[in-house]
């Protein structure tokens, strides 16, 4: 994108703010933002910042950092979940402008009601695994960390080593999985949004 995606403003909110708002509306009790420097400046109250311990190595390392923090591993005291679903963590990428809170809650519920050994619930859109709009078990932190330390950098390959639940998503909910990879994507999204506003006001 050539700039920090999280700070791009759409509809009066940054992409990061849009992601945090969607997670809160979906019922998230704790939210952790994993970023290159772990800077908490501007984050809403109650949202924690964690520094990416391996910046530039792809999403696998960042997911490990986030899961470890939520699991308490970084404090040396992994707490046992008190309720069904308490071990479920929803991972989202902040370059998705239209995270649907209901869809996020649905993905979390898939894993919460799956067999305990199921490591993750991965939505599939147009044949592609949406690993950055998915639900993970907190205990997956250490197995993924071991794979990362062994040299694995592909999140998709790392997940292939664990039991996962994959669910095809179709229809309007697919908008929740749209991402903005480059300036062309961003320009197209802004043009579509402007067209919708003009159509509504007209």
Image (cartoon, grey):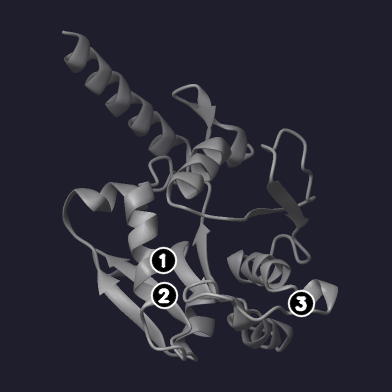
Q: CA distance from mark 2 to mark 3?
A: 21 Å
Expressed as whole percent of the image width and height from the top left, the position of residue 66 reads 67, 65
Which dot, 2 or 3, sits closer to the camera? 2
Is tag 1's residue or tag 3's residue first in the polypeptide sequence? Answer: 3
**Residue positioned 68% across, 74% down in the render:** 71
Does residue 138 appear left or right of residue 109 in this picture? right
The label shown at residue 108 is: 1
Which residue occupies the extreme top position in the image? 202
Q: Quadrant of the N terminus?
A: top right
Q: Quadrant of the C terminus?
A: top left
**Residue positioned 73% across, 79% down in the render:** 78
Q: Is residue 95 visible?
A: no
Quarter of image, res 123: bottom left
Expressed as whole percent of the image width and height from the top left, the position of residue 169 reads 23, 63
Q: Which residue is mark 2?
A: 112
Q: Could you classify mark 2 by the number of other residues whose Cα lies within 10 Å: few (under 14), some (14-19), or many (20 or more)? A: many
Vertical placement of 198 versus 4: above or below?
above
Quarter of image, res 42: top right
**Residue positioned 55% across, 76% down in the render:** 154
Which of the pair 144/86 is nearer the observer? 86
The label shown at residue 73 is: 3
Q: Are marks 2 and 1 in contact (CB under 8 Å)?
A: yes
Quarter of image, res 127: bottom left
Is tag 2's residue or tag 3's residue first in the polypeptide sequence? Answer: 3
Q: Are marks 1 and 3 in contact (CB under 8 Å)?
A: no
Q: Are marks 2 and 3 in contact (CB under 8 Å)?
A: no
Which residue occupies the extreme right position in the image? 75
Q: CA distance from mark 2 to mark 1?
A: 6 Å
């Amino acid at each position: 994108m050539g700039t920090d995606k999280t700070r791009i403003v759409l509809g009066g909110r940054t992409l990061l703010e849009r992601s945090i708002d969607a997670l809160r509306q979906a019922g998230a009790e704790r939210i952790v933002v994993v970023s290159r420097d772990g800077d908490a400046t501007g984050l809403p109250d109650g949202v924690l910042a964690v520094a990416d311990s391996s910046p530039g190595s792809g999403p696998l390392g960042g997911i490990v950092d986030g899961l470890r923090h939520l699991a308490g591993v970084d404090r040396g005291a992994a707490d046992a979940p008190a309720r069904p679903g308490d071990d479920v963590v929803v991972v989202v990428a902040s370059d998705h402008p239209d995270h649907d809170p209901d869809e996020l809650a649905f993905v979390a519920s898939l894993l919460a009601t799956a067999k305990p050994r199921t490591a993750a619930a991965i939505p599939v859109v147009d044949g592609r695994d949406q690993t950055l709009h998915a639900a993970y078990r907190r205990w997956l932190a250490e197995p993924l960390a071991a794979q990362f330390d062994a040299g694995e950098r592909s999140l998709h390959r790392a997940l292939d080593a664990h039991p996962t639940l994959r669910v095809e998503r179709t229809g309007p909910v697919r908008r929740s999985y749209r991402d903005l990879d480059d300036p062309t994507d961003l320009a197209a999204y802004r043009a579509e949004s402007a067209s919708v506003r003009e159509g509504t006001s007209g």
